[in-house]
Amino acid sequence: MKTLNYNQIQPTSIDGNLIKKIASDWMLVTAGDKDKFNTMTANWGGMGYLWNKPVVFVFVRPERYTYQFMENSDGFTLSFFDEKYREALDLCGTKSGRDCNKVAEAGLTPHFTGLGYPAFSEARLVLECHKLYADTLSKSSFLDDEPLRIHYSTKGGLHKMYIAEIARVWAK
């Protein structure tokens, strides 16, 4: 990825407020391979340290087209963009790759990381993530029913949570 004006940095060197990066700035979760991949905008997830590794955790509903790519891949990327790409992120969060080529419609340029995961040249920060654990949320495991009532009563299935090691970080 060095050829795309990226520098590899350590996960501990990621700049800025991680909650803002995910919740407000959004990210693209992208999985698949050179033959076929999909991406989706997400603002639920986090970063931290688990099992003596830098990790991310993201959530994908089974109804999302990206879900099948997450299930069939060993890893994925998280791509973060400057504000000028907000419309592209909005499009990737509202259109399905089942129905259109949303990457092309969003004006994004796919490239593949050293681990072979799809990412986008326009991103200012790309995390290559190797899956470590996945599980579907369970209604019986909610200790407070508010998230269940607000986010799952009529809006689709329970998310699957993926915990992944941050294998490499690329920053512009």
Image (cartoon, rainbow, N blue to C red):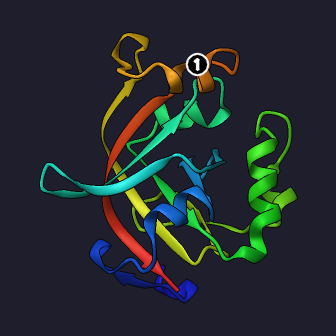
**SS category of the residue bearing label 1:** helix
| Residue 78 point in image, percent of width and height | 51, 58
Q: Picture quarter containing residue 27?
A: bottom right
Residue 131 can be seen, yes or no: yes
* The furthest residue to the top: 140
**Closer-to-camera residue (142/162):** 142
Q: Amino acid at mark 1?
A: Arg
Residue 57 percent location from the top left of the image: 39, 46
Q: Is residue 73 above or below residue 67?
A: below
Question: In the picture provided, is 27 more to the left or to the right than 127?
Answer: right
Using residue 100 as the reference point, say whether residue 36 is left or right of it.
Answer: left
In the displayed structure image, the side of residue 20 where residue 82 appears, left or right: right
The number of numbered badges drawn on the structure is 1
Q: Position of residue 120 (x, y in %)?
A: 63, 67
Residue under the image location 80 percent in, 43 percent down: 94
Is 29 or 114 nearer to us in this picture?
29
Please tell me which residue is depicted at 35% across the width and 20% down the height of the picture: 143
Q: Residue at x 33, y 48 (%)?
A: 164
Residue 24, picture quadrant:
bottom right
**Relative image position of residue 69 (x, y in whole percent):** 55, 37
Whether residue 158 is visible, yes or no, is: no
Q: Which residue is mark 1?
A: 149
Q: Residue at x 49, y 85 (%)?
A: 6
Question: Is 24 displayed left or right of 100 in the figure?
Answer: left
Relative to 68, is 78 above or below? below
Q: Residues within 10 Å of mark 1 (few under 14, many from 20)?
A: few
